Amino acid sequence: MRFDTVIIGGGLAGLVAGISLQQAGRSTAIVSTGQNALHFFSGSFESMKEAPERLTALFAGAGIRVHYNPGVRLTPLGTFREAELSLEDISLFPEAKFADKALLACVPGYLDFFPAFLAEGLEKQGIQCRLCSLDLPEELQDGSVERRSVQLARLVDRDWKKIVQQIRLMIQDEDAVILPQLFGLQDASVPEHLRQEIPARVVFAGTMPPSIPGIRTQRLLKRRYEVLGGTYLGGDEAVEAQVEGNKILSVRTHNLEAHALEASHFILASGGFFSKGLRSNPFRVWEPVFGVDVDFDEDRNAWYNEEFVGDQPYMQYGVRTDVTLHPLVDGQPRGNLYAIGSVLGGTRPELGSGAGLAIRTAFLAVDKILESL
Ligand SMILES: Cc1cc2nc3c(=O)[nH]c(=O)nc-3n(C[C@H](O)[C@H](O)[C@H](O)COP(=O)(O)OP(=O)(O)OC[C@H]3O[C@@H](n4cnc5c(N)ncnc54)[C@H](O)[C@@H]3O)c2cc1C
């Protein structure tokens, strides 16, 4: 099978690159093993000090809306973190005291949401909290299904009008209503309906992972990629590359066995340790598909910080590249291969971190590929 570009990894970086190349009329394939960092996404994009038009247009095409509003967001544990560019349903406030009184809506037996922590955190900010219970969707009432985010999220969008009715009956003098981030998985317009129909400021509070806004974002990007004609090989793993001189000729995958994926360009978007884009044993860190150079400390003791909650040096390890994101092998760039996203670790601080790094490097690699054609 031959494509213009083959992308290894279908997380944020791989999908942004794939959509952009498809939009430019290139034929691409994405091979992706499975879960990625979007499934754990807070909804806020790190290191994005602006909302680039190119990104908002790409997201809008996929049905994803973002807003740029520097401030703080509420975490699942009732604390506040600085945030800037975020998915539209993540509330951003100029300061942590965003209301005087809040009605905190809980779902009985819901295992991934901790209203007591939220209430404690909000009370610390001077926000008076009152807890109320929402009725469960019928399918969950007999107790045979575990009340996890994904199970609830499959059902709640359908019932949004009933939820509005319940809240309207329960609300007294509260100026904010806090709901779990459970909405919008089946129907992305539901968070906005809730905001419009509930007569108070609606705030969606994060739950424990997986993240429903993150899963929705991944699904919408994947759907957009496929609508544009991209070939998404989900549940498959790139295992090795065929190389000639400085060039990658093809990539072999686990499922396709003998049918290697040939292309003019390859993009490595396989993520960091979390997604197995980088591997390690007690002696070294390596990149498993192309075997490109990885920046890491030879001294094993320098990999981690004994202060558990401090910054961990190993999180900075990543694939070494030249300025145009070509990974190096023994110091020599692989001419038709680009590394993007968190597989770079902290090796390219000038390009940001987290989601900002994934997006910037995806666009950079796409531009280089299109320039070269
Ligand atoms: C748990 C977690 C939460 C995060 N939360 C945030 C956040 O809230 N905000 C933020 O800005 N940043 C966050 N980040 C940082 C995150 O890394 C980036 O935001 C960004 O989503 C990374 O995207 P990526 O595409 O580079 O990598 P990933 O999302 O890791 O995707 C890599 C993909 O490649 C696949 N893959 C790996 N090896 C292969 C192979 N050999 N063959 C085929 N497929 C392969 C993996 O299965 C995975 O699907 C988080 C990171 C983690 C780990």
Image (spheres, rainbow, N blue to C red):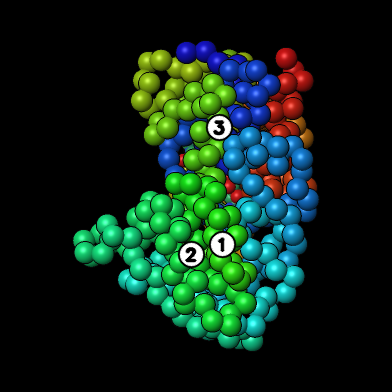
Q: Looking at this view, is 199 or 239 the one in front?
A: 199
**Relative image position of residue 276 (x, y in whole percent):** 47, 44
> Is 90 displayed left or right of 1 in the figure?
right
Q: Which mark is residue 197?
A: 1
Q: Which mark is residue 224?
A: 3
Q: Residue type at mark 2: give it.
A: Val
In the displayed structure, 191 sits above or below 104; it is: above
Q: Are marks 1 and 2 in contact (CB under 8 Å)?
A: yes
Q: Which mark is residue 24?
A: none
Q: Nearer the viewer, mark 3 or mark 1?
A: 1
**Relative image position of residue 159 (x, y in whole percent):** 40, 56
Q: Residue type at mark 3: give it.
A: Arg
**Relative image position of residue 329 (x, y in whole percent):** 63, 30
Between discs 1 and 2, the one toward the N terminus:
2
Question: Could you classify mark 1 by the number of other residues whose Cα lies within 10 Å: few (under 14), some (14-19), or many (20 or more)?
Answer: some
**Relative image position of residue 304 (x, y in whole percent):** 56, 62
Q: Which mark is residue 164?
A: 2
